Image: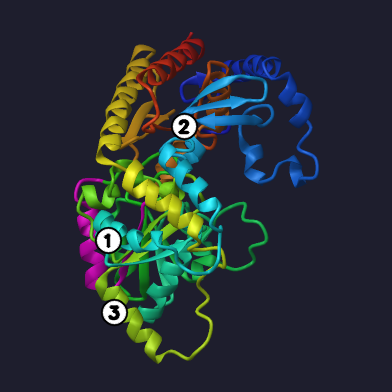
Amino acid sequence: MHSDNSKTIGGISRDRIAQLRETEGAVFRKARPKSQAKVGNGLPGFFGGVPMHWMNDWPTPFPILVDSARGATITDIDGNKLDDFCLGDTGSMFGHSPPPVARAIRRQAGRGLTYMLPSEDALAIGPLLQQRFGLRFWQIATTATDANRFALRVARAITGREKILVFNGCYHGSVDETMVRLIDGKPINRPGLAGEFRDLTRTAKVIEFNDVAALEAALKARDVACVIAEPVLTNSCMVLADAGYHEALRKLTREAGTLLLIDETHTISTGPGGYTRKYGLEPDLFVLGKPIAGGVPASVWGMSEEVASRYADYNRTKEPGYSGMGTTLSANPLQFAAMRATLEEVMTQENYDRMDHLARRLDAGLTGVIDRYRLPWHVSRVGARVEFICAPGPLRNGAEAEGAHAPELEAAIHVALVNRGVLIAPFHNMMLISPATSGAQVNRLITAFGSVAAKLAA
């Protein structure tokens, strides 16, 4: 864990980190005079100077103003090209504007963008989702947050239970009940929530990932409607599942009459059917957002045949009225067109094989750099998703992941990598390999990482 009072972070002195951040910040500004003139004081008209508040969370001195993105390369308005390993933090996991998706968007653009009715593409998508992910019945939403909310509503409806169970350090979009954490073993609202006056722990239980005993104890009262889980904790420092943990999770949820929701929004990096298909998970409910439509906002959520049957029974007996699920722009024909192109032509086994091959090369290259400079860091990977973590590993739960997070050090590294032509995810050290990523880009990332590590370890 990184102490606020420590003179080092991740084995590197605070003074050296601050010096690197300062010198690299100056290099960044010098390379972007047009961007600094236009966005250095914020984008006009936007609260906080950005269209979405988290754009200010990038560690660069000001946000990069993008001119264009193609494949796995971003070009800013100053003409700087960046090898993009952030890829919209998974939204563009298959590259920017994959040609099949771009063609589908152009075709649909002249035929109407939304009309609250299905298009012919919808006829293909249902069977594609069944074949790909194994669940029988599907619905379309616009974000994974929406999909998770709707799936949890179904879980509560058919079980008659109010509580859900989440894992410390999880991320499932902005679903309210998942915004809880364990601090010194005590469940609390996640620190920093804006305008949240409710005690979210009243309806949500939170335990550590990989802790089978805690899982068994949390389910014992048989009051949990659903466990919502990423197969791998991903939105912090990455935490992989222990051998046998997912088998225990499935067994214990079934014994307790609790449904299991697997959120694959990030772990779809594992393979064409996600972590679920590759490792034989058997969820009752399944959610996938971000890259499912090649960058067009869309998500899907699926139900097993049993869940769908129970939900149909529930609908026959509940009082009439609005279900509380659904947004007007969900399941629009633009989503259908982009999703069909993504499922049929982009999320192919051939593309995943290429992504996995280059991710293995990246994993080995980053690990080699860490070993060369004897840094107390490690690398974690799930399919095409790779992360270097500025702490020893492997990590086993959310508390360890939180303790391994080193914001000052990570920010300095991120800016230094940008100055060497490489962009990684801003909130942690995540890197994605897309079908468009080249071996040369992976090599440049490893070289850039080595250059930054040498400066820090000198």
Please tell me how crowded label 3 is: few (under 14), some (14-19), or many (20+) other residues with Cα within 10 Å: some
Q: From the viewer's side, name the closer residue of 257 and 27.
A: 27
> Where in the figure is residue 318, as x and y percent of width and height?
43, 89
Residue type, label 3: Ser
Q: Residue at position x 38%, y 22% from top?
A: 438
Nearer-N-terminus badge (1/2)? 1
Q: Quadrant of residue 37?
A: top right
Distance (Cα) linking label 3 and label 2: 42 Å
> Where in the figure is residue 162, as x and y percent of width and height?
43, 76
Residue identified by numbered label 1: 130
Nearer-N-terminus badge (1/3)? 1
Residue identified by numbered label 2: 429
- Considering every residue shown, the one lying at the far top of the view is 458
Magenta region? 242-264
Closer to viewer: mark 1 or mark 2: 1
Q: Residue at position x 39%, y 33% from top?
A: 434
Residue type, label 2: Asn
Q: From the viewer's side, name the closer residue of 295 and 203.
A: 295
Please tell me how crowded label 2 is: few (under 14), some (14-19), or many (20+) other residues with Cα within 10 Å: many
Q: Quadrant of the N terminus?
A: top left
Q: Please say if 20 is above or below 395.
A: above
Question: Which disc is residue 344 wearing?
Answer: none
Q: Quadrant of residue 447?
A: top left
Closer to viewer: mark 1 or mark 3: 1
Task: Inspect this view and state whether residue 261 appears.
Answer: no
- Say left or right for 97 vs 271: right
Residue identified by numbered label 3: 309
Residue 47 lies within the magenta run: no
